[in-house]
């Protein structure tokens, strides 16, 4: 049951057959090509929104594309990296992939709102967001031959423990695991979805919108072994000016209002 999983763990694994083997392979190859570009080239991936473009920190490196379910937006992204001619093949691959994930995002959000009996708000809610597609690369940690040093988690940390601020996050990892999610009783569990499935995760904004009814989990990436890890993320994000406010139907004596209405950009 989707709602129960999101209440208890804040995430669930979704088997999604629209991500074909062929499409996954194309996305993986596109990411290899993109991250092989020189750093100054990748740094041309900029956005007017903070943290939406190229990011690089320790083992983690990432490229961002706004509304990659719209082909023109992906063409703008490849044009940043290849100003002379763009990259038609990579554009089409990322666009197709993002379209599929957006389809899943809309399906999940519709399902969640129906389960809480707030169908009247579905269209308004679905129209109040945009998408960010992230392509992520995690380099394997440097060798550590010091036997006195037990697992140096700082060295192996691909991405620090955090919750996502957005609505819903859909993550897909390729070949190499590393994602861990924290349970409500403070245990870290390794997430190992199959190649044709994705992890759907609640963000803080959805938690607030639903008056705390769903759990927004802490998660991190721990890198072990010698292999580079690639993953993708689709993030549904409230548009500028959208006020996040729990519907009256979700506020009662048992569930008093937890969050004051707020604008996402002030969050």
Image: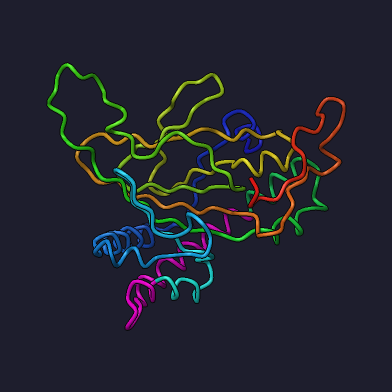
Q: Is residue 252 above or below residue 197?
A: above
Residue 158 on image: x %, y %: 34, 39
**Magenta-highlighted residues:** 78-106
As for residue 6 lying within the magenta part, the answer is no
Q: Position of residue 63 (x, y in %)?
A: 39, 58
Q: Is residue 108 left or right of residue 247?
A: left
248 or 27: nearer the viewer: 248
Left or right: 149 in relation to 95:
left
**Which quadrant holds the N terminus?**
top right
Total marks placed: 0
Residue visible at 32% across and 64% down in the picture: 42
Q: Position of residue 184 (x, y in %)?
A: 56, 23
| As drawn, 176 above or below 77 | above
- Quarter holding the C terminus is top right
Magenta span: helix, strand or loop, mainly?
Answer: helix
Indicate the quadrant where residue 180 lies: top left
Looking at the picture, the colour scheme in use is: rainbow
Which residue is rendered at x = 36% and y = 61% of the image?
27
Residue at the farthest left position: 145
| Residue at 39%, 58% in the rendered image | 54
Task: Decide if residue 17 is on the left or right side of residue 174.
Answer: right
Q: Where residue 216 sits in the image (x, y, percent)?
A: 59, 35
Q: Residue furthest top?
A: 148
145 left or right of 152? left
Q: Is residue 83 magenta?
A: yes
In-front residue for pair 116/49: 49
Position of residue 19 relative to residue 153, above or below, is below
């Amino acid at each position: 049951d989707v709602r129960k999983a999101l209440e208890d763990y804040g995430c669930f694994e979704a088997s999604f057959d629209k991500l074909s083997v062929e499409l996954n392979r194309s996305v993986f190859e596109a990411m290899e090509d993109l991250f092989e570009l020189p750093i100054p080239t990748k740094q041309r991936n900029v956005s007017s929104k903070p943290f939406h473009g190229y990011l690089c920190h320790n083992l983690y490196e990432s490229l961002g594309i706004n509304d990659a379910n719209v082909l023109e937006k992906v063409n703008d992204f490849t044009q940043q990296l290849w100003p002379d001619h763009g990259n038609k093949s990579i554009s089409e691959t990322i666009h197709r992939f993002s379209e599929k994930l957006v389809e899943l995002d809309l399906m999940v959000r519709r399902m969640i709102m129906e389960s809480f009996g707030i169908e009247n708000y579905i269209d308004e809610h679905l129209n109040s967001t945009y998408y960010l597609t992230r392509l992520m690369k995690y380099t394997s940690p440097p060798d550590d031959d010091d036997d006195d040093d037990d697992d140096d988690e700082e060295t192996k940390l691909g991405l620090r423990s955090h919750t996502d601020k957005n609505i819903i996050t859909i993550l897909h990892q390729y070949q190499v695991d590393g994602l861990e999610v924290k349970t409500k009783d403070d245990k870290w569990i390794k997430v190992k979805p199959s190649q044709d499935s994705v992890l759907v995760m609640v963000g803080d904004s959805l938690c607030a919108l639903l008056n705390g009814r769903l759990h927004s989990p802490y998660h991190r990436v721990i890198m072990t072994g010698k292999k580079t890890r690639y993953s993708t993320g689709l993030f549904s994000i409230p548009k500028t000016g959208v006020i996040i406010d729990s519907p009256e139907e979700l506020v009662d004596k048992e569930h008093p209002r937890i969050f004051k209405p707020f604008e996402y950009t002030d969050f």
